Amino acid sequence: MMFEDNVLQKTVAFVIERHNGQFRNDGTTPYVTHPITVAMMCLQKGTDADFAVVALLHDVLEDTDTTEEELREIYPKDIVDDVVALTKDPARKGEYLESLHKENIRVRTVKAADRLHNLRDAKTPHWKKAYLKTTREFLLPMAKGTVFYDELKWECDNE
């Protein structure tokens, strides 16, 4: 999909506004650094702007008061559909993780980058251990065929 030239800048501004006041698990790092890092990871692997936009938005429905309807007013259907696919429903965690295997390459790539960043940024051994367990069980198989599979596998094999 062809976006206007400044869609990444507008999306960064949008997520900065929406995640304002939120912090990573350390309590000091602004949360918005996470989706920005995930988007940068995707771009550094050569993905297109659509991957980066989905990466920027991947937690906005789950962690802010942003609605799906709001996103649909701003972004194309395929982008919003991917963001919705990446949004966890706490009541259906196992189903969510299993359903990721069936998603398109953009959803699987963004989820793999998301998990890779969370593994590398885990602030405590407890969080790292929990991330590694679900990564090995669900997310590593889902990541096959993505540009992040080898790095994710290395993280799992070397911990």
Image: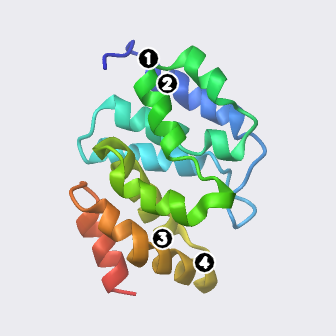
Say which residue appears at 25% left-offset and 48% top-offset. Answer: 45
Q: Are marks 4 and 1 in contact (CB under 8 Å)?
A: no
Question: Which residue in the structure is indicated by mark 2?
Answer: 9
Q: Which of pointers 3 and 2 lies earlier in the amino acid sequence?
A: 2
Cα–Cα span, label 4 and label 1: 36 Å
Q: Is residue 19 left or right of residue 149?
A: right
Q: What secondary structure is marked by label 2?
A: helix
Q: Looking at the image, which residue sits at the far right?
A: 21
Say which residue appears at 36% left-offset and 47% top-offset. Answer: 103
As drawn, the label of residue 119 is 3
Percent from the top left, x then y, of residue 64? 72, 40
Say which residue appears at 69% left-offset and 46% top-offset. Answer: 63
Q: Are marks 3 and 1 in contact (CB under 8 Å)?
A: no
Q: Which of pointers 3 and 1 lies earlier in the amino acid sequence?
A: 1
Amino acid type, callout 2: Gln
Question: Which residue in the structure is indicated by mark 1?
Answer: 6
Percent from the top left, x then y, of residue 4? 39, 12
Is 159 rendered above or below residue 74?
Answer: below
- Residue 155, picture quadrant: bottom left
Percent from the top left, x then y, of residue 104? 32, 43
